[in-house]
Amino acid sequence: MIDANALMRAAKERTGLSYWGDDWYLETMRWLVDAINTESELTEFGTGALPEMLIAHLVNQLEVNDWFKRHPEIGEVEITAPLFGIVLPRTGSTAFSHMMGLDPATRILRVWEQERHCPPPEKATELTDPRIAIS
């Protein structure tokens, strides 16, 4: 059985952080954990992997909240004219993203960055960031 409180404790232990920010996620996380415990038929691999996946998301939440708390100026950054590429799967969305990434004026979200948000990547190390090897 997966225990939501144990997942949160594990994320806090891994990061040394404890500030979760708003508690908007608590109810839905508990619904998810309850559904996993009562409705899913996890394989042995799933039983081991799923809690780790959930902990990774909670770690990200702690790190993002910590980063924002230490850098409140982020909230003042204006995002102008964002471009969203919304397409069906297997229709060239990855190629589109890579092409957009060739434009130095465009900021794209890389796969490794989706996995580990903090600290935000820097232009100087966007191709050598150690998180690339993890994803």
Image (tube, helix red, strand yellow):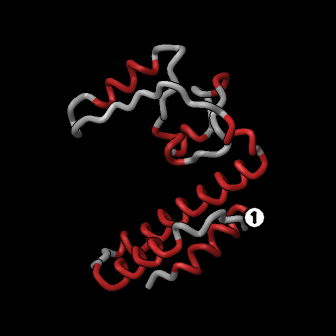
Q: Position of residue 51 (x, y in %)?
A: 48, 71
Q: Position of residue 95 (x, y in %)?
A: 32, 24
Residue sticking out furthest to the right: 70
Q: How many marks?
A: 1
Q: Quadrant of residue 121?
A: top right
- Looking at the image, which is closer to me, 81 or 20? 81
Q: Residue at x 65, y 60 (%)?
A: 62
For the N terminus, the quadrant is: bottom left
Q: Quadrant of residue 55?
A: bottom right
Left-right relation of 32 to 110: left
Q: Residue at x 46, y 28 (%)?
A: 82
Circle 1: residue type = Gly
Q: Quadrant of residue 22?
A: bottom right
- Looking at the image, which is closer to me, 46 or 103? 103
Describe the element under mark 1 as helix, strand or loop. loop
Q: Residue at x 66, y 63 (%)?
A: 21
Label 1: how many residues lie within 10 Å, few (<14), some (14-19) or many (20+)?
few
Q: Is residue 22 above or below residue 9?
A: above
Q: Please name the residue that numbered disc 1 is placed on.
A: 16
Q: Position of residue 64 (x, y in %)?
A: 64, 52
- Looking at the image, which is closer to me, 78 or 113? 78
Q: Is residue 126 above or below residue 134?
A: above
